[in-house]
């Protein structure tokens, strides 16, 4: 009997591949109904997205200019996809595709590739360990919209909902933190503060039942338990946009508060980002670093994102193989975000 052919589709944010792409990227972002949602939003979302994208594009393009003129997210996600395909090959006839939410290769392109490949099943794998409607849910909803439009519903589909507590993911985080802490060899652990920084979301989303904050807090708890460090630590949030109340404390406010209290050494751990992009490379490693140094911080170190860390890739492969084998353990703590439910072969 011929082996089953599996298409693995990784979901990721995407990022502009040039400074000219910044405005259309931002337009796509602010057009997302899972991000911009309020009464009568359908009537004003498009002109609002166009206005905000145009207003912010010059400032954001300057930031991309400081990290090489574009986002590195596609190259890094491609490396992750290739590593995952190699990890799966001994046990599964699988091809890994990339579906970016806001810039190329977009979800529609991934679906066309899957349709052309005569696959027996599709496994959807968000590159977001912690589940949220703003990330995994948004990508999944877009996948449903485009699948219906392009006629992909007949292929059985399964979803890896979340893996924030996967032991290999936790081990990869701990190894990266230990590498960053190597910059402080010989320092008193009490003098080096660990700042776990996650992308923030509006509090209103959490109040509607989104599990993101709980997943982030559990990730930090498991990482601290595994790392067994004596360093003081704080969980904070970054990347706030707009006037609404977002999760707190903020990364900027936390850095300022710690510096005011005399903390001179900091390690920032991007706990919710598995791929380096503008929010790590610029927001943390340039903006926050400059702010910290102005406040008297002497040593500011950012832990790189996991990218293609072997244990992280092994965690992803394990989740895919479990679903390919029909293991429903991932379903036992299913994604609780308000995403559309897979109609075939999944949850």
Image (cartoon, rainbow, N blue to C red):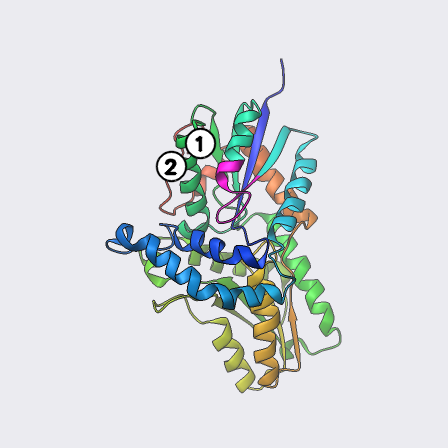
The residue singled out by tag 1 in the image is 346
Q: Is residue 100 magenta?
A: yes
Image spot of residue 114 (x, y percent): 54, 30
> What stretch of residues is rendered in magenta?
98-109
Q: Which of the 4 quarters of the picture holds residue 179? A: bottom right
Q: Secondary structure at mark 2?
A: loop
Residue density around tag 1, few if under 14, some if 14–19, many if 20 or more, within 10 Å = some
Q: CA distance from mark 1 to mark 2?
A: 8 Å
Image spot of residue 160 (x, y percent): 50, 39
Q: Nearer the viewer, residue 134 or 192?
A: 134
| 11 in relation to 89, above or below | below
Residue density around tag 2, few if under 14, some if 14–19, many if 20 or more, within 10 Å = some
The residue singled out by tag 2 in the image is 341
Q: Is residue 284 left or right of residue 157?
A: right
Image spot of residue 337 (x, y percent): 38, 47
Q: Nearer the viewer, residue 106 or 328?
A: 106
Query: Mark 1 touching mark 2, by CB under 8 A?
Result: yes
- Any mark on residue 28, and which? none
**Quadrant of the frame with the C terminus:** top left
Q: Is residue 33 magenta?
A: no
């Amino acid at each position: 009997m011929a082996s089953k052919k599996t298409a693995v589709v990784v979901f990721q944010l995407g990022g502009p591949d040039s400074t000219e792409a910044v405005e259309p990227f931002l337009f796509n972002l602010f057009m997302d109904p899972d991000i911009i949602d309020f009464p009568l939003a359908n009537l004003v979302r498009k002109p609002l997205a166009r206005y905000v994208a145009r207003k912010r594009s010059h400032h954001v393009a300057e930031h991309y200019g400081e990290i090489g003129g574009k986002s590195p997210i596609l190259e890094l996600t491609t490396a992750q996809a290739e590593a995952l395909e190699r990890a799966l090959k001994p046990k599964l006839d699988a091809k890994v595709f990339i579906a970016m939410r806001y810039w190329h290769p977009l979800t529609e392109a991934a679906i066309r590739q899957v349709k052309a490949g005569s696959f027996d099943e599709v496994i959807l794998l968000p590159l977001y360990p912690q589940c949220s409607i703003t990330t995994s849910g948004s990508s999944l909803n877009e996948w449903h919209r485009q699948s219906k439009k392009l006629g992909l519903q007949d292929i059985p589909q399964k979803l890896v909902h979340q893996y924030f507590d996967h032991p290999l993911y936790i081990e990869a985080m701990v190894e990266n933190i230990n590498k960053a802490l190597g910059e402080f060899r010989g320092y008193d652990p009490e003098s080096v503060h660990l700042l776990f920084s996650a992308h923030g979301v509006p509090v209103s989303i959490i109040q509607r039942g989104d599990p993101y904050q709980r997943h982030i807090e559990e990730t930090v708890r498991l990482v601290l338990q595994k790392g067994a460090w004596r360093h003081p630590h704080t969980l904070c949030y970054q990347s706030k946009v707009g006037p609404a109340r977002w999760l707190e404390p903020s990364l900027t406010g936390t850095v300022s508060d710690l510096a005011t209290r005399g903390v001179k050494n900091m390690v920032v751990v991007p706990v919710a980002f598995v791929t380096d992009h503008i929010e790590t490379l610029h927001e943390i490693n340039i903006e926050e670093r400059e702010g910290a140094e102005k406040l008297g911080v002497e040593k500011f170190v950012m832990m790189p994102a996991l990218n293609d860390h072997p244990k992280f890739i092994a965690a992803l492969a394990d989740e895919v193989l479990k679903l390919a084998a029909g293991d429903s353990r991932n379903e036992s703590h299913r994604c609780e975000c308000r995403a559309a439910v897979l109609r075939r072969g999944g949850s």
